[in-house]
Image (tube, helix red, strand yellow):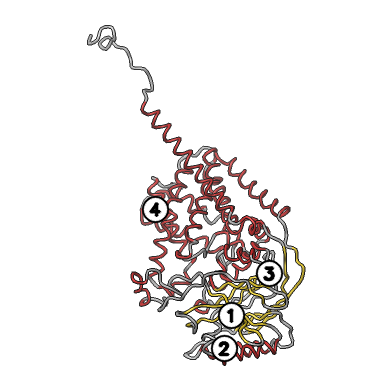
Amino acid sequence: MRTVERWLTSPWRRSCAGALAGALPVLAFPAPSLWWLAYVALVPWLLLARSAPTGRRAAYDGWCGGFGFMVAVHSWLLPSLHVFIFLIAGLLSLLWAPWGWLTHRLLGGEPSPARAAVAVLVLPSGWLMVELVRSWQGLGGPWGMLGATQWQVTPALRLASVGGVWLLSFLVVAVNVAVAVLVSVREARAPAVASLVATAAATSAAWVWAPRPDVDGHVRIAVVQPGVVDGGDSGDRRFDREEQLTRQLAGQHPDLIVWGESSVGYDLGDRPDLARRIAVLSRETGADILVNVDARRSDRPGIYKSSILVGPDGPTGERYDKMRLVPFGEYIPARSLFGWATSVGKAAGEDRRRGTEQVVMNVGHGLRVGPLVCFETAFPDMSRHLAQDGAQVLIGQSSTSSFQHSWAPEQHASLAALRAAETGRTMVHATLTGVSAVYGPSGERVGPWLGTDASTAQVYTVPIARGVTPFVRYGDWPVDGALLVLAVYCLSEGLRTVRLRRGAGAPLVPPARTAHGSPVRPGR
């Protein structure tokens, strides 16, 4: 132990150790999907910040760990953003500096059992604030939330229906803090064990008492995944491939057919020939087709990404324009300042335009669906609002074609399991190039994954559920709870500081009486 402490006295070695410790949780996400690792992956980072010689150094440890975490979780963006990803990670990792300082404040030295118990509540709350701030769309959105590592764990999905991915993140961090206390603070093991027992009790209670979705029917939804199509005329050849695959669905009686993001590269108002070809497919298969158009609109200025429903007579008028755009990929924030990003990566040459409201579509057969485009599936509030508005099935249209040989396709597909569990609604994740997947109203997988090597059309029989989950009803209440915990902690610390200052200003003992300082004979 002393050898490690001596090795960490070097600021450079300590910074590298912090970055590596912060990167460790990435192994809990797909594709490795070592979900169990999430419950101990933060322990090295916590122990590092705890052992910092000063609070300032602990804040720097928090920054270094946040840098490693952000780079690791978004490493698949490196071919697109190049050096710019390190600048973004460096700025966003500042959010973890207060968390590192708070870790040192609560766990540094020899913390009492009471202080360790406070840490088990305050540190997960602080982590949730980091996730809340970086979940803002302008900062990149909620990709890589720690709770998302539990997408295939059935008890965790039950908890997601109660408090969303926020509750999962809180509990995962709480377990990490408890483990860190167990291995480093012998005197405070009792509250650490109590927090682990409380986590197990909360999971058990959710398993028993949380309402389950009531399945009252099934529909058949087909996903068309054309696969990778390269070349200068890739847009036309991709459409031909999608048309070919969709025609194979004739006679399979789908209720809806879904194409992936940017499946049509031309505005259907400018290309009525394409609209007619899709309408013919709708008549042949007996189902409406939800396509995604990435093109300059003919009826208003600008480029939009739009989910458009096409029936046997052509576009039905049901349309959703993507609202939350990918920073740098679909627009450049403060283009006058950061426009140079187009010269070092694959940043957007022209900003896409945003939609103004979410849409629930009537797609025939009595089915109402809520479309989401690309990384909008990472936002819990968007799927929650669609469920509140009456969507029976959530549809995610995505591409990820630029990231085929990375962990991004698997990570993106896994998010659909969380959105399904949170809302109690089946979610269909349809992509151009994989991974496409479907998850039932409890977050369980329905049918096969379509991997990045697949070019096919697949029909899924998906359950339709009714009822309202606690998360849909009450929203992001774990975030509100975390804010309350931090407010109470800050208030108590403030009052404690005031008391200490007042105590320091008063004399601790009466002044001593001496022969030369006697009040009776002063000066003697």
Badge 4 marks a residue whose secondary structure is helix
Q: Gap in Å between the C-alphas at discs 1 and 2?
A: 15 Å
Q: Secondary structure at mark 2?
A: helix
Kindly identify which residue carries mark 2. Answer: 239
Q: CA distance from mark 3 to mark 1?
A: 18 Å
Amino acid type indicated by mark 4: Tyr
**Disc 3 + disc 4, Cβ < 8 Å:** no
Q: Give the residue type that dot 3 points to.
A: Gln
Distance of mark 2 from mark 4, alpha carbons? 51 Å
Q: Which residue is mark 4?
A: 60
**Quick check: 482 above or below 330?**
above
Q: Secondary structure at mark 3?
A: loop
Q: Disc 1 marks which amino acid?
A: Ile
Question: Nearer the observer, disc 1 or disc 2?
Answer: 1
**Between 234 and 387, which is closer to the camera in this rendering?**
387
Q: Earlier in the sequence, mark 2 or mark 4?
A: 4
Mark nearer the N terminus (3 vs 4): 4
Q: Amino acid at mark 2?
A: Phe
In three-dimensional space, the C-alpha distance between marks 1 and 4, rounded to whole angstroms, equals 48 Å
Residue 334, position as x, y percentages in the image:
37, 69
Tell me the number on the disc at residue 308.
1
Quadrant in which the C terminus appears: top left
Instruction: Give the number of the mark in front: 3 or 2.
Output: 3
- Mark drawn on residue 392: 3
- From the image, state whether disc 1 or disc 4 is nearer to you: 1
> Of the residues under marks 1 and 2, which one precedes in the sequence?
2
